[in-house]
Amino acid sequence: MAKDLEKTLIKKLELEKSYSKTNLRYLKAGRPIIRTDVTSPKKKRQKIDEMILGLHKKECSSVLKKMGRYENYTEYFDFIKKSDYKNGYIFLKIKFFLVPREFMINVKIDRMKEVKDYPFVFNTGFLDGLKGILKVEEFNNRCLFHFTMDWEGEHTGLSNFILENFMYTIAKYGIRKMLLITGHGRAF
């Protein structure tokens, strides 16, 4: 079984062009891998490509009970000032210390309840049109999650460096908090 887990993790890392022995070791130890790239493919445009891959120490049913409670995100994350979920949409107000402004985000996503793929899209606000998918898989009584998202649009007004660090930091901070509240413990 351990060999199958290693093969699965290697394939996922290779798919995301993030394979290294260190990343494999981190994943097996329960540390998530985060990759964020922000580029400017054209003048006055920006492109974001982000990936998070992690292996939770608990079964998915346990993890998804908390992760799927979108309206409770203000209790879980101090950078989320408002959270609500209605008719398949999450409404969030985010204020993160790296950027001195609030962001309103409207995300279309099903409530996470079971092992499956959860496509999502940002419908308004900051990064309008951002698309992604959260794949949740059960593997050897552990929850394997694979989050990818990408966006291309008008320049946000933030430099690529600032936007990349903002996106990476919020992903790292968010996944760290989610792992703690779902019983995984400290991951990094």
Image: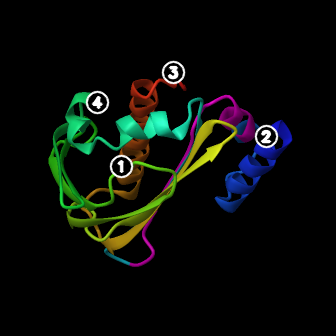
Q: Residue at x 31, y 74 (%)?
A: 44
- x%, y% of residue 177? 39, 29
Q: Amino acid at mark 3?
A: Arg
Mark 3, Cα crowd under 10 Å, few <14 / some 14-19 / many 20+, is few
Say left or right for 16 vs 182. right
Scheme by which the image is coloured? rainbow
Element on which disc 4 rests:
helix
Q: Disc 3 on helix, strand or loop?
A: loop
Which residue was labeled with disc 4?
76
Alpha carbon distance from label 3 to label 4: 15 Å
Give residue 15's position: percent from left, percent from top. 68, 61
Can you say whether 147 is above or below 58 in the image? below
Give the residue at mark 1: 162
Q: What's the distance in space between the residues labelled 1 and 3, CA to CA?
A: 26 Å
| Marks 1/4: CA–CA distance | 25 Å
User: What's the residue at 41%, 78% (across, down)?
Assistant: 42
The residue wearing badge 3 is 186
Q: Are marks 3 and 4 in contact (CB under 8 Å)?
A: no
Q: Earlier in the sequence, mark 2 or mark 1?
A: 2
> Magenta segment, which residues?
24-42
Q: Specify whether residue 33 is in view.
A: yes
Whether label 1 touches label 4, CB < 8 Å: no
Q: Label 4 vs label 2: CA separation?
A: 32 Å
Closer-to-camera residue (93/20): 93
**Circles 4 and 2: CB atoms closer than 8 Å:** no
**Which corner quadrant holds the N terminus?**
top right
Q: Earlier in the sequence, mark 4 or mark 2?
A: 2
- Give above or below for 123 relative to 14: below
Q: Earlier in the sequence, mark 1 or mark 3?
A: 1
**C-alpha separation, residue under disc 2 versus residue under disc 3:** 21 Å
Residue 86 is one of the magenta-drawn residues: no
